[in-house]
């Protein structure tokens, strides 16, 4: 008789965050300003801190039809995809109405993060969309996103997601393993890193009109990380094409790392020999490094990482090393010395 032993990171599907909870972040943030006020910060400091968290408000989203409506996605016939039972959860799936309204997407403005960003993101057209594949590959090319998605076998996986800001959620991503993409892209053996780059369109993304950040957004992985079983390119969520605020039409999900490593709305993937410097690392490398692996024992310079707030339930739970995926990924970092692996 075959006896299946579950790895420690595997969670029962019944524990996934409910879809309704995932989308309710907006309600939880209602008391954010009051909380900051309770800290006793001066008015200017309060405003700056709220802006740094994306809670300061800002202009409303443009009116009119949403060109980024996922209901018009040309690949919607591929959803829902087959569920992969190997990737399950120990907690409920976050309700969709919560998670869909609790998003950071600084391309659309730091003042619109979380509670307004979904409406603003919907104004970004999803097609035409191409992904450039270049660098140390057998053949550089540019591929339409629909052709890329249809070239891959889509599946659904339940993953934890941990933000560096100490909130968390559990979501049903749909997409394909990054290692499948790597095989398809055929990089050369000299490639040591995979560099990813987000779109640049300041006509639609107002945050890119500011000089505060060195756009476009860039980050990367080692080839060993990219070809780990957990690394996942996301095209959908909750059994349908992903809305823009989740990083449609193509984003990365690396659940053992803090969320800023999961690049959104990718337009370029380069295989390179030199380690990429991510946008946040470039701005403040002391707080946002290349590795960014989750560790409760290593605090952010401005707050603790020992616990996290579940946006679906509002409950606080202890943070797990590598976000609970240590059995799958800890070996990637064995023997690495002189590197800050957890920030």
Image (cartoon, rainbow, N blue to C red):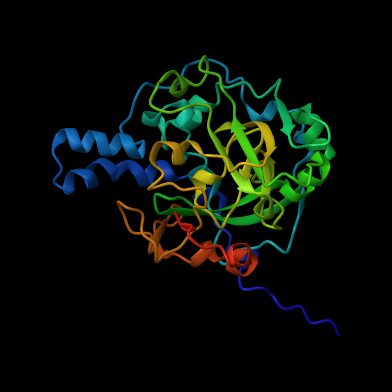
Task: Name which quarter of the figure residue 181 lies in.
Answer: top right
Name the spot of residue 214 as percent of width and height, x first.
46, 27
Residue found 45% across the figure and 45% down from its top: 24
Q: Residue furthest right?
A: 1
The answer to whether residue 303 is visible is yes
Where residue 7 appears, x then y in whole percent? 66, 73
Quarter where residue 151 is shown: top right
Kindly identify the residue that appears in the image at 39 percent across and 49 percent down.
165
**Quadrant of image for the C terminus:** bottom left
Most extreme residue toward the bottom, as rendered? Answer: 1
Count every numbered label the image shows and give the total: 0
Viewer-closest of 79 and 36? 36
Q: Can residue 10 be seen in this view?
A: no
57 sits left or right of 220 in the view:
left
User: Which quadrant, please, contains the N terminus?
Assistant: bottom right
Q: Is residue 197 above or below residue 90?
A: above
Whether residue 118 sits left or right of residue 228 in the image: it is: left
Relative to 317, is 190 above or below? Answer: above
Front one among 171 and 334: 334
Viewer-closest of 52 and 136: 136
Residue drawn where x is 58% and y is 60% of the image:
16
The spot of residue 322 in percent (x, y) is 53, 63
Residue 98: give x, y in percent of width and height. Answer: 48, 45
């Amino acid at each position: 008789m075959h006896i299946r032993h579950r790895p420690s990171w595997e969670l029962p599907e019944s524990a996934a965050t409910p879809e309704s909870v995932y989308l309710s972040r907006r309600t939880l943030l209602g008391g954010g300003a009051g909380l900051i006020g309770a800290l006793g910060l001066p008015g200017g400091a309060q405003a700056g801190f709220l802006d740094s968290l994306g809670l300061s408000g800002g202009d409303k989203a443009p009116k009119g039809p949403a060109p980024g409506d996922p209901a018009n996605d040309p690949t919607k016939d591929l959803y829902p995809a087959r569920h992969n039972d190997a990737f399950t959860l120990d907690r409920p799936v976050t309700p969709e109405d919560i998670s869909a309204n609790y998003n950071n997407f600084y391309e659309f403005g730091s003042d619109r993060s979380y509670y307004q960003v979904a409406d603003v993101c919907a104004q970004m057209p999803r097609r035409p969309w191409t992904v450039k594949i270049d660098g140390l590959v057998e053949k550089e090319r540019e591929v339409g996103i629909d052709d890329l998605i249809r070239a891959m076998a889509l599946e659904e996986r339940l993953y934890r997601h941990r933000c560096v800001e100490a909130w968390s959620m559990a979501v049903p991503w749909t997409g394909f393993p990054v290692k499948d993409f790597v095989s398809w892209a055929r990089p050369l053996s000299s490639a040591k890193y995979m560099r990813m780059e987000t779109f640049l369109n300041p006509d639609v993304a107002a945050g890119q009109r500011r000089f505060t950040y060195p756009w476009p957004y860039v980050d990367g992985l080692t080839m060993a990380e990219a070809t780990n079983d957990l690394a996942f390119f996301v095209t959908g969520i909750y059994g349908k094409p992903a809305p823009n605020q989740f990083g449609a039409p193509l984003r990365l999900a690396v659940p053992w790392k803090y969320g800023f490593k999961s690049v959104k709305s990718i337009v370029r993937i380069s295989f390179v020999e030199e380690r990429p410097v991510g946008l946040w690392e470039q701005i403040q490398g002391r707080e946002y490094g290349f590795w960014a692996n989750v560790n409760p024992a290593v605090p952010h310079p401005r707050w603790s990482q020992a616990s996290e707030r579940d946006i679906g339930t509002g409950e606080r739970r202890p943070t797990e090393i590598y976000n609970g995926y240590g059995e799958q990924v800890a070996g990637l970092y064995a023997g690495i010395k002189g590197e800050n692996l957890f920030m």
